[in-house]
């Protein structure tokens, strides 16, 4: 059972998500690991790829290598999106559900639920929750002083349009 399904977050938790997201970052790698989703998820991800914005946070789309309908990128260093990833372990961690994990928090932005995780290297990663496919977004390190809320707001229409609400496959 997805722990986010029955959990309601108040405005303070969302405000904390956006505040922490403002300290987001990601590596500027030329290549990105391409997910290997099942057939149903692959179809959803292909639809998402077609619906993604051409620009994001003022950056033009420039997909990483190897090219795939399961990955997208904007700018350099790139904002990276991967669709069809496996469920992050923290998504079912009771400490996260209780708000007891300083490195992970759940919240919603424009109708899309996200798990925000601070990685050990200081990068920030966002993964959709309560959707039939997991979509993961990672932001560049140099953007630590920029708010990631604009990125999540800009991606929300594409995610809502192509990835239905529900529970993602466990594979």
Image (tube, helix red, strand yellow):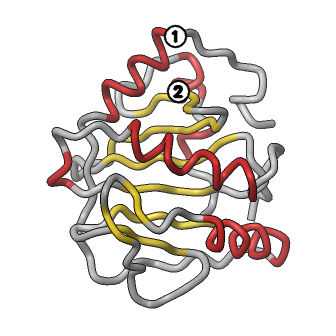
Residue 159: % across, % down? 66, 52
Image check: 121 left or right of 153?
left
**Residue under the point 40% across and 72% down:** 61
49 over 133 or under it: above or below = below
Q: Helix, strand or loop at disc 2?
A: helix
- Tell me the number on the disc at residue 96: 2
Relative depth, front residue between 80 and 93:
80
Question: Which label number is shown at residue 146?
Answer: none
The quadrant of the picture occupied by the C terminus is bottom right
- Closer to us: mark 1 or mark 2? 1
Q: To which residue does mark 1 refer?
A: 11
Whether the residues at callouts 1 and 2 have beta carbons within 8 Å, the answer is no
* Residue sitting at x 72%, y 58%: 133
Question: Would residue 155 be visible to someone looking at this image?
Answer: yes
The x and y percentages for residue 30 are 28, 82
Quadrant location of the N terminus in the rendered image: top right
């Amino acid at each position: 059972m997805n722990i986010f399904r029955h959990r309601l977050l108040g405005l303070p938790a969302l405000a904390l998500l956006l505040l922490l997201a403002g300290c987001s970052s990601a590596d500027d790698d030329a290549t990105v690991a391409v997910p290997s989703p099942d057939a149903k998820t692959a179809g959803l991800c292909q639809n998402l790829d077609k619906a993604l914005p051409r620009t994001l946070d003022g950056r033009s789309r420039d997909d990483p290598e190897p090219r795939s309908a399961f990955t997208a990128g904007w700018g350099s260093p790139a904002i990276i999106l991967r669709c069809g990833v496996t469920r992050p372990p923290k998504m079912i961690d009771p400490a996260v559900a209780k708000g007891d994990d300083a490195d992970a928090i759940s919240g919603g932005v424009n109708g899309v639920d996200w798990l925000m995780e601070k990685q050990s290297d200081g990068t920030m990663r966002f993964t959709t929750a309560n959707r039939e496919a997991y979509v993961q977004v990672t932001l560049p390190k140099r953007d630590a002083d920029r708010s990631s809320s604009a990125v999540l707001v800009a991606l929300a229409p594409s995610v809502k349009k192509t990835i239905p609400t529900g529970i993602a496959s466990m594979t």
